[in-house]
Image: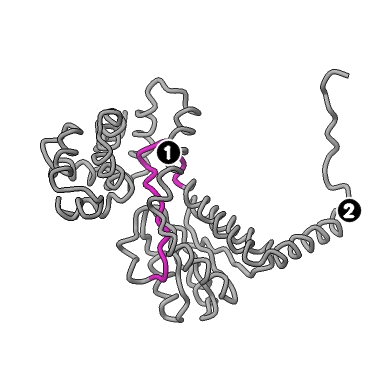
């Protein structure tokens, strides 16, 4: 039996179905609603007009162009999208339903490309620069993530470590997290990967960082408004749960971009650290660390 589907025929589906009929100004409104749904559901028509560089009339016209009776019904649909993304079963069911007869790989690729295209409109360059500076100036970086986001935190820590920077990945939950929090210091910078939810553990990490004076960067698509006043920078990513793209895709990309920016700012030091890595690998495994690959082509 299928999970309940509050987004069935929902906002994203309507935008996708009508995208070719929307005017450029109407698309500006739908882009904002897709990229910043949490802000959109609490905004008035006048506020949405100001945020999208359009007019009240355009906002209302956009709602009707999408088949809604008005802005109120449109916002209810966006709210349903926000609510559904907290339930993994609903998210998966809707992703599979949306595939229809489309080849899975094609849909994953298309939605991933769409997410990439929307990322520059959501991620604030000044926030990104702040995040880079905080990590650059820190004595150590702590990278935290829960569940799938912990893989992004580990990747980020690995990349920074290979550049010669101290970075500790954390992924503990429950009581075990307390031991890790105890080891944090005021010379740390904390980078939290929290795509969708403000778990109690994430709240505890933010509180501990505030207690010791460690700056925090949060990478998220959903909790910006909840943490904005508690952190030094928020790196926002586009909503992912209504499409087939991975929920970790944008966060991983941001982690990679942060690492690359830090490497670019200390090119010689980063290259030297990688050279030390290669030397240590040779000391461990010798010079022949790869299995020989034999060309099986015609000879």
Magenta segment main secondary structure: loop
Q: Where is residue 68 in the image (x, y as percent from the top left)?
A: 15, 35
Mark 1 — residue?
Answer: 114
Q: Give the camera-side residue of 145 and 3.
A: 145
- The residue tagged with tag 1: helix, strand or loop? helix
Q: Position of residue 98 (x, y in %)?
A: 35, 29
Compared to residue 120, the image places residue 276 above or below, namely: below
Mark 2 — residue?
Answer: 286
Q: Which residue is drawn at 29% across and 47% down?
A: 32
Left or right side of 135 for 41: left
Left or right side of 56 for 2: right
Residues in magenta, as a range: 231-247
Q: Residue at x 20, y 33 (%)?
A: 66
Q: Which residue is drawn at 52% across and 61% down?
A: 171
- The residue tagged with tag 2: helix, strand or loop? loop
Q: Position of residue 176 (x, y in %)?
A: 50, 67
The quadrant in which the N terminus is found is top left
The quadrant in which the C terminus is found is top right
Q: Give the camera-side residue of 134 and 205.
A: 134
């Amino acid at each position: 039996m299928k999970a309940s589907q509050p987004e069935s025929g929902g906002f994203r589906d309507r935008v996708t179905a009508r995208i070719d009929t929307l005017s450029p100004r109407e698309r500006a409104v739908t882009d904002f609603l897709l990229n910043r749904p949490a802000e959109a559901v609490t905004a008035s028509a006048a506020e949405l007009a100001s945020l999208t560089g359009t007019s009240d009339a355009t906002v209302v016209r956009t709602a009707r162009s999408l088949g809604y009776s008005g802005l109120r019904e449109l916002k209810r649909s966006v709210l349903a999208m926000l609510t559904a993304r907290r339930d993994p079963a609903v998210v998966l069911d809707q992703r599979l339903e949306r595939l229809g007869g489309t080849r899975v790989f094609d849909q994953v690729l298309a939605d991933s490309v769409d997410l990439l295209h929307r990322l520059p409109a959501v991620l604030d360059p000044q926030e990104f620069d702040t995040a880079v500076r905080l990590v650059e100036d820190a004595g150590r970086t702590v990278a935290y993530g829960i569940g799938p986001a912990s893989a992004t935190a580990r990747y980020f820590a690995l990349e920074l470590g290979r550049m010669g920077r101290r970075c500790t990945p954390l992924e503990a939950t429950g009581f075990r997290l307390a031991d890790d929090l105890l080891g944090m210091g005021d010379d740390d910078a904390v980078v939290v990967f929290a795509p969708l939810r403000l778990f109690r553990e994430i709240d505890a990490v933010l509180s501990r960082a505030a207690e010791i004076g460690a700056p925090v960067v949060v990478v998220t698509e959903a909790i910006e408004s909840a943490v904005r006043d508690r952190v030094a920078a928020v790196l926002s990513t586009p909503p992912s749960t209504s499409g087939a793209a991975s929920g970790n895709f944008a966060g991983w990309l941001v982690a990679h971009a942060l690492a690359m920016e830090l490497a670019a700012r200390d090119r010689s030091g980063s290259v030297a650290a990688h050279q030390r890595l290669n030397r240590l690998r040779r000391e461990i495994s010798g010079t022949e660390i790869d299995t020989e690959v034999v060309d099986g082509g015609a000879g």
